[in-house]
Image: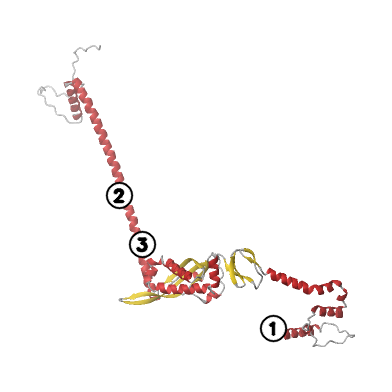
């Protein structure tokens, strides 16, 4: 390829000269130059003197003699020493390495790794006696278990106000790019069989933060994504062979990601890959096409059952609250009635004590007074029929409705108060 560049350069020079010759005036005092004279071909003479050729061209065409200028003569003499010094300085500076903040570097001295450099400037032997291999420092990656043609293209960020990306489509009746078909266990009657499901399992990983992990990821594996993908595929085949569709879509799905992540991490540690799994995400698991409609019905029944359970729990809670309210009202009423009865009993007790003291002091007079008071209270609203033989036929019956005080003799002298 390099050999073909020389004829190409000479041909381009001849073509450029032919085009420029149309616009350049002819000098009648000088003979026309041969077309075969090439400036590029003249540079191949040994020893190469490009500056001398340029000096002759300037002198012949423009009359400028650079040989009379001391600065150009000094530059021509000092060119090779200065070039050698610059080359030597550049070779020495090849031993200075800059490590970015998100990276690390494995320093090799005479081809043997001796240290892991952190972010910053580091000095070592110049190339090729010492070199630094770049290693990531805490950079997190996401890897899907499936490999598709879309992975070769650069993924662009979708706008926040735009339509959702195609990867967000999780309908069971559509095929997705990052999904992988997997064989799972099944049972048809009394016979064992298998089914095929589509799943999207993603692994979030990074290279370990220790120096040993950095060296292991560099020297023990040539392609970390391919290693993780192959290890995960092997683990998925082994793990899903003992699971059924109901287990994947039901109760065991919550612990599926943890089981897969632990198994893949154990295999990667056994291979001494230096990879640290941060998370295992099961984006989607699609049942087979034949079971999609049936599982939709199962999901609908499960949602209906959960709604019924929630409704019954709400009714039970309502009844419990109502029973608690009724019990509280009954307890308050019983407390009030008990307090009222107790107060009545206390009042009756006080009244009985007072009446006993009055009877002890007044005797029969108190009993007569109580008798008449009870009689007055009982006959206050009663219809009375008075029969008296002293009432004759000549005189009309007379009823005295005046209120009488307890019997007393108005003519009896009162005792003076002493």
Q: Which residue is mark 2?
A: 323
Residue 393's spot in the image, x, y percent? 10, 23
| Number of residue marks | 3
Taking depth in this image into account, of 192 and 52 the one nearest to the observer is 52
Tell me which residue sits at (70%, 85%) in the image: 3
Tell me which residue sits at (50%, 73%) in the image: 227
Gap between marks 1 and 2 measured at Cα = 99 Å
* Crowd band around label 1 with a 10 angstrom C-alpha radius: few (<14), some (14–19), many (20+): few
Mark 1 or mark 2: whose residue is earlier in sequence = 1
Mark 3 or mark 2: whose residue is earlier in sequence = 3
* Crowd band around label 2 with a 10 angstrom C-alpha radius: few (<14), some (14–19), many (20+): few
Gap between marks 3 and 1 measured at Cα = 76 Å
- Look at the picture and state if 222 lies above or below 349: below
Q: Taking 403 as reference, is 127 left or right?
A: right
Q: Which residue is mark 3?
A: 306
For residue 291, say whether it is visible.
Answer: yes
Q: Which residue is mark 1?
A: 2
Question: Which dot, 3 or 1, sits closer to the camera?
Answer: 1
Residue 196, image quadrant: bottom left
For residue 406, say whether it is visible.
Answer: no
Tell me which residue sits at (29%, 39%) in the image: 336
Residue 124's spot in the image, x, y percent? 65, 67
Gap between marks 3 and 2 measured at Cα = 25 Å
Give the structural element (helix, strand or loop) at label 1: helix
Give the structural element (helix, strand or loop) at label 3: helix
Mark 3 or mark 1: whose residue is earlier in sequence = 1
- Look at the picture and state if 215 lies above or below 51: above
Taking depth in this image into account, of 131 and 76 the one nearest to the observer is 131
Would you say the residues marked 3 and 2 are in contact, meaning their CB atoms lie under 8 Å apart?
no
* Crowd band around label 3 with a 10 angstrom C-alpha radius: few (<14), some (14–19), many (20+): few
């Amino acid at each position: 390829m390099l050999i073909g560049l020389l004829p190409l350069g000479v041909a381009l020079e001849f073509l450029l000269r032919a085009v420029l010759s149309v616009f350049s005036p002819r000098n009648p005092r000088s003979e026309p130059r041969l077309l075969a004279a090439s400036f590029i071909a003249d540079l191949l003479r040994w020893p190469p003197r490009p500056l001398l050729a340029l000096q002759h061209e300037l002198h012949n065409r423009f009359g400028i003699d650079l040989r009379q200028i001391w600065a150009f003569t000094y530059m021509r003499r000092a060119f090779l020493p200065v070039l050698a010094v610059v080359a030597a300085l550049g070779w020495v500076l090849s031993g200075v390495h800059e490590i970015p903040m998100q990276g690390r570097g494995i320093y090799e001295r005479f081809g043997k790794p001796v240290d892991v450099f952190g972010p910053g400037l580091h000095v070592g032997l110049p190339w090729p006696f010492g070199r630094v291999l770049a290693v990531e420092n805490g950079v997190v990656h996401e890897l899907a278990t499936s490999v598709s043609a879309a992975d070769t293209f650069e993924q662009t960020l979708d706008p926040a106000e735009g339509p959702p990306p195609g990867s967000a489509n999780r309908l069971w009746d559509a095929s997705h790019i990052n999904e992988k078909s997997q064989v799972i266990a099944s049972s048809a009657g009394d016979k064992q069989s298998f089914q095929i499901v589509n799943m999207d399992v993603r692994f979030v990983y990074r290279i370990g933060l220790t120096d040993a992990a950095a060296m292991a990821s560099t020297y023990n594996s040539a392609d970390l994504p391919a290693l993780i993908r192959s290890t995960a595929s092997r683990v998925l085949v082994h793990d899903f062979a003992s699971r059924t569709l109901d287990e994947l879509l039901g109760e065991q799905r919550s612990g599926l990601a943890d089981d897969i992540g632990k198994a893949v991490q154990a295999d990667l540690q056994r291979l001494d890959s230096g990879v640290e799994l941060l998370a295992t995400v099961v984006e989607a698991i699609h049942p087979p096409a034949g079971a999609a409609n049936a599982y939709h019905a199962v999901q609908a029944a499960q949602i209906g059952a959960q709604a019924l359970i929630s409704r019954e729990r709400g009714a039970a809670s309502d009844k419990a609250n109502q029973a608690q309210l009724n019990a509280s009202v009954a307890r308050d009423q019983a407390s009030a009635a008990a307090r009222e009865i107790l107060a009545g009993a206390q009042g009756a007790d006080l009244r009985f004590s007072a009446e006993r003291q009055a009877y002890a002091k007044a005797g029969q007079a108190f009993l007569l007074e109580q008798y008449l008071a009870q009689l007055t209270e009982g006959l206050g609203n009663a219809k009375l029929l008075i029969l008296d033989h002293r009432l004759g036929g000549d005189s009309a019956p007379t009823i005295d409705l005046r209120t009488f005080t307890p019997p007393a003799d108005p003519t009896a002298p009162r005792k003076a108060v002493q």
